[in-house]
């Protein structure tokens, strides 16, 4: 079942980009021609402040907009947070949960990630659940144990291939320019595929599993051709339309 889910290339802008950065979206929309639209889905997750503007700017382009996090509750006294129904209401379709920067900066546990993913799905959003090991964990041979545990504990009840995407992002590869070998990516994605099908029988084989961590135009073809890699979660290289679209081009 390798590479059968439709590819998704998702850009995570993190805490980058003032209003002027939205012009990059226009350039992305122009490059996302019908030839590419037939091959892969595109998603940009800007800072949540820009979601409504981004949605209106990308109307009719086929590029989807997502958020970078959501609160597990639909509303309430949670200063500074945004909820999944708010994200949906703003016109977004996806939300990233459990990014390693949220896990480390905000102490998010896998149990919290699960609650967020369930809130996202309940609001009609696709949840992108991130998992990945640190350098120490890889070097001590525990990468699969860590990723397996994150998957099991972050797994939202009732997940389907249409409502859940997994992003494997080795923490040591994020923003560092380092990437695992293709053989290591194949090994981990094969393991994640097995776990997905075990956790959601009949769904896991069709779930998109993204690779994330220093994906660039130069390494995208190699990484995207690894079995069970169904697209990418891209940080730094999603900020410029030329870099992001050069990555997407590997699917043409
Ligand atoms: C990310 O943070 O999700 C990411 C993959 O970042 P980068 O592409 O910059 O390594």
Image (cartoon, rainbow, N blue to C red):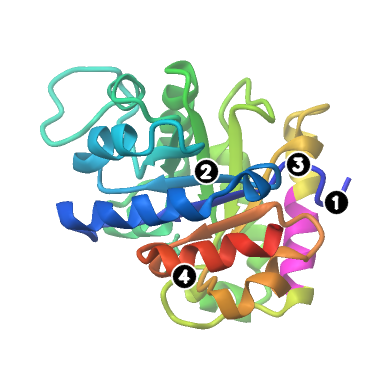
From the top left corner, tell me how far across and down residue 247 is, in percent.
Answer: 57, 66
Which portion, as a residue range, is magenta? 184-192
Q: CA distance from mark 4 to mark 1?
A: 26 Å
SS assignment at label 2: strand
Q: CA distance from mark 4 to mark 3?
A: 24 Å
SS assignment at label 3: loop
Q: Residues within 10 Å of mark 3 (few under 14, many from 20)?
A: some
SS assignment at label 1: loop
Residue under pointer 3 = 5
**Is 248 or 4 nearer to us in this picture?**
248
Q: CA distance from mark 3 to mark 2?
A: 16 Å
Ligand 1 is found in the corner quadrant, namely bottom left
Q: Which mark is residue 243?
A: 4
Q: Of the residues under marks 4 and 2, which one precedes in the sequence?
A: 2
Q: Given this view, does label 3 or label 2 mark the residue nearer the observer?
A: 3
Q: Is residue 94 left or right of residue 101?
A: right
Q: Is residue 11 left or right of residue 73?
A: right
């Amino acid at each position: 079942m390798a590479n059968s889910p439709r590819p998704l290339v998702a850009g995570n802008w993190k805490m980058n980009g003032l209003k002027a950065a939205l012009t990059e979206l226009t350039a992305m929309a122009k490059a996302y021609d019908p030839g590419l639209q037939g091959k892969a889905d595109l998603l940009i997750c800007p800072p949540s402040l820009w979601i409504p503007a981004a949605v209106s700017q990308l109307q009719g382009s086929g590029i989807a907009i997502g958020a970078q996090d959501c609160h597990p509750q639909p509303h309430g006294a949670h200063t500074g947070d945004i909820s999944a129904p708010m994200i949906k209401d703003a016109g977004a379709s996806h939300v990233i949960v459990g990014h390693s920067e949220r896990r480390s900066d905000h102490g998010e546990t896998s149990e919290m990630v699960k609650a967020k993913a369930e809130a996202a799905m309940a609001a009609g959003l696709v949840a992108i659940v991130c998992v990945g090991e640190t350098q120490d964990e890889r070097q001590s041979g525990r990468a699969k144990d860590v990723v397996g545990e994150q998957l099991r504990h972050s797994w939202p009840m009732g997940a389907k291939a249409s409502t859940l995407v997994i992003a494997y992002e080795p923490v040591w590869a994020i923003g560092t320019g380092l990437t695992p070998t293709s053989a290591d990516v194949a090994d981990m994605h094969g393991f994640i595929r097995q776990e997905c099908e075990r956790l959601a029988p009949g769904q896991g084989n069709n779930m998109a599993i993204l690779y994330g961590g220093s994906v660039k135009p130069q390494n995208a073809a190699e990484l995207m051709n690894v079995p069970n890699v169904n697209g990418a979660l891209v940080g730094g290289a999603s900020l410029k339309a030329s870099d992001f679209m050069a990555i997407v081009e590997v699917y043409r």
